[in-house]
Image (cartoon, rainbow, N blue to C red):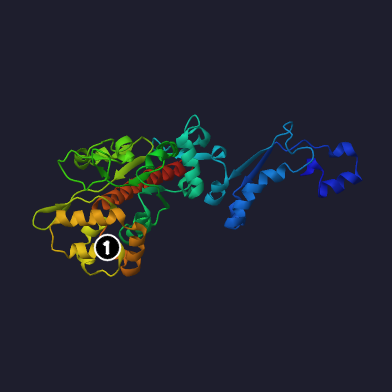
Amino acid sequence: MGWMQVGKAEKKAATGKAEEFVLPPLHLVLVEEPEAHLHAQVQQVFIRKAYDILRKHDALGKNTGFSTQLIVSTHSSHIAHECEFACLRYFRRLQAREKGHVPTSTVVNLSEVFGTENETAKFVRRYLKATHCDLFFADAAILVEGAAERMLVPHFIAKHYAFLHARYLTILEIGGSHAQKLRDLIEHLGLLTLVITDLDAGGTDGSAIQPAIGAGQMTNNPTLKDWLPGKSTIDELLAASAADKVKTDIDLFAVRVAYQMPISRPNNETALPYTFEDALIFENFETFKTIKGTGLIGKARAAVNSGKTTVEIGADLFNALRSGEKAKFALDLLFNQSPGMLNVPNYIAEGLAWLEVELKQKQIEVIPVAVAAAAIGVTA
């Protein structure tokens, strides 16, 4: 703070000629990765207070005659979490196009992601403030429907997807009615994303109903209607191909949606789940016959032991889940059953397998280019 002539600079100025100590104001202050030396909580305090400290002088304050830019480079989600959305600049990595070329970066101004101020922009800012900004630093994002998926999907990954488990994934609980509101942000960041959501069948009045094939049902899920795969009827959604569920671009960025699909059962019967919970139950039918627990766990155990047809069991589960506590279901399941021993619902398994392939492909295309680029400077 030499130009302010405070602290050591003040003492030095008092002993010399005044004109020798008239220093220009600091117009630009650069701080590189302050998280390297600060505890997580202190990081948040630092970024909240740093600019105020730069302006803490009688000649500054709210005086617009002098301005200072503070630029902080960081890999800390704690620091990003405390910054205003409009102040964030994201360096998006672009892969090399040809052998011998090197990857480059482009800067995404997050204040321009949504264009003019609107309700979607307000929601995204509030949501990211209420959660955590791992989104900006992750290798990939997984958007999930509810608390049960958020608690159990990490266990599925740890047990069955070793490559994914070694990557930096962020899992955000946002639900089908809001996931598409992150679309502009995800596409600007170029972030590889898997959206795990619900089929959410609805009647003509919009009320939730048990899904059925050939019944002319519609989905109530805005993500499926307005983003991916962009289809409105249950029959269209069930008939959608793998390609219909994916959006890709040239920079190894892709988004895929995963939602419940039919599950084959004995006696040529087919289960058509409505949510994550009944899909999990049908995929682990024998396990739920003996699993301990009350609430939804107890109702699921009773349903699978009832001896009813698959359609009737599906109806019992549908009614139980509509009024049950799904978060408690997941917690009870974690308490009574090792989640790693459960079969992963087929639609989630397909989505995670896709994500694993995409991340491997991204790694393969980066490493040879980097090796080739390094070799350019090597001489015999």
Residue kind at label 1, given as amino acid type: Leu
Which of these two is toward me, 176 or 54? 176
Which of these two is toward me, 371 or 204? 204
Residue at horizontal 61%, vertical 47%? 32
Classed neighbour count for the residue bearing mark 1: other residues with Cα under 10 Å, few (<14), some (14–19), many (≥20)? some
Residue at horizontal 70%, vertical 34%? 67
Q: Would residue 378 be visible to someone looking at this image?
A: no
Residue wearing tag 1: 342
Q: Quadrant of residue 280?
A: bottom left
Kind of element beneath mark 1: loop
Residue furthest left in the image: 267
Residue 52 vs 271, above or below: the answer is: above
Q: Would residue 40 be visible to someone looking at this image?
A: yes
| Position in image of residue 1 (x %, y %) | 76, 44
Q: Quadrant of residue 103?
A: top left
Residue 350 vs 328, above or below: the answer is: above
Residue furthest front in the image: 205
Residue at horizontal 15%, vertical 56%? 310
Residue 127 vs 340, above or below: the answer is: above
Tell me if 165 is positioned left or right of 23 in this view. Answer: left
Q: Quadrant of residue 184?
A: top left
| Position in image of residue 348 (x %, y %) | 28, 51
